[in-house]
Image (cartoon, rainbow, N blue to C red):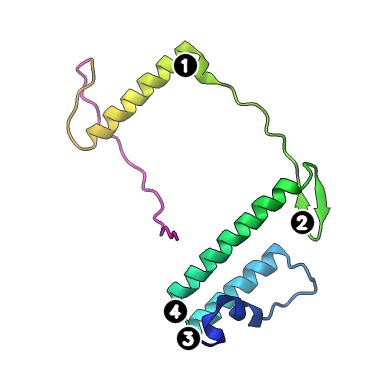
Amino acid sequence: MGASKNLLMLMNQQEVESNNFFLTKKEIQTSSKKFITEVLEAGEVDKYELIAQAKRMQEALEVINTELLKVLPQENFEAFGLKGTFRNGGDTINYSEDEIYKELKRCLDERADLLKLAQKQEVADLYGNIVPKVSTTPRKSSLSIAF
């Protein structure tokens, strides 16, 4: 298992052209795209092993990021090429405390269920009206990876 089998070692070998110790977002994106293109074109690595290593690194970095955010003061800052902007969470209105809102929401949910059923079979609502088969909008396909 040579250096070409270890994502961290491969990344360490990658040269990044920058006048900065702290790379800009654009430099990171450009360098990362160049890196993975070169690694894949060389054909010396298993794509699935690389994605497995990358997902694990991503998970580790997300945990590190989350823990660091917990200890940073909740204030604006600029440091090391980053700009942090504190945003107060504000309040959310509890619409469900209103009886009229709850009733309208229940009716909308029931209608949504009828519209879903109408996609598969002909169905009528409580008033005897045939529920139309409405159009659909495709969702973006994706590949979910878990470990």
Q: Give the range drawn in magenta.
A: 127-147
**Which residue is more in the foreground, 69 or 124?**
69
Identify residue for label 3: 44
Identify residue for label 2: 82
Q: Is mark 3 on a helix, strand or loop?
A: loop
Say if residue 133 shows up in the picture: no
- Relative to 92, residue 2 above or below: below
Left/right placement of residue 142 relative to residue 73 reads left
> Answer yes or no: do the residues labelled 3 and 1 have beta carbons within 8 Å?
no
Real-space CA distance between mark 4 and mark 1, rounded to the nearest whole angstrom: 54 Å
Q: Which amino acid does label 3 sit on?
A: Glu
In the rendered structure, which disc, 2 or 1, sits on the residue that comes first in sequence?
A: 2
Measured as percent of width and height from the top left, residue 129 is found at 21, 20
In the rendered structure, which disc, 3 or 1, sits on the residue that comes first in sequence?
A: 3
> Answer yes or no: do the residues labelled 4 and 3 have beta carbons within 8 Å?
no
Identify residue for label 1: 101
> Answer yes or no: do the residues labelled 3 and 2 have beta carbons within 8 Å?
no
Q: Which mark is residue 128?
A: none
Measured as percent of width and height from the top left, residue 50 is found at 49, 73
In the rendered structure, which disc, 2 or 4, sits on the residue that comes first in sequence?
A: 4
> Answer yes or no: do the residues labelled 2 and 4 have beta carbons within 8 Å?
no
Identify residue for label 4: 46
Real-space CA distance between mark 2 and mark 4, rounded to the nearest whole angstrom: 35 Å
Real-space CA distance between mark 3 and mark 1, rounded to the nearest whole angstrom: 60 Å
Residue depicted at 60% across the width and 76% down the height: 8
Q: Nearer the viewer, mark 2 or mark 4?
A: 4
Q: Which amino acid does label 4 sit on?
A: Asp
In the rendered structure, which disc, 3 or 2, sits on the residue that comes first in sequence?
A: 3
Residue depicted at 46% across the width and 85% down the height: 43
Q: Which amino acid does label 2 sit on?
A: Leu
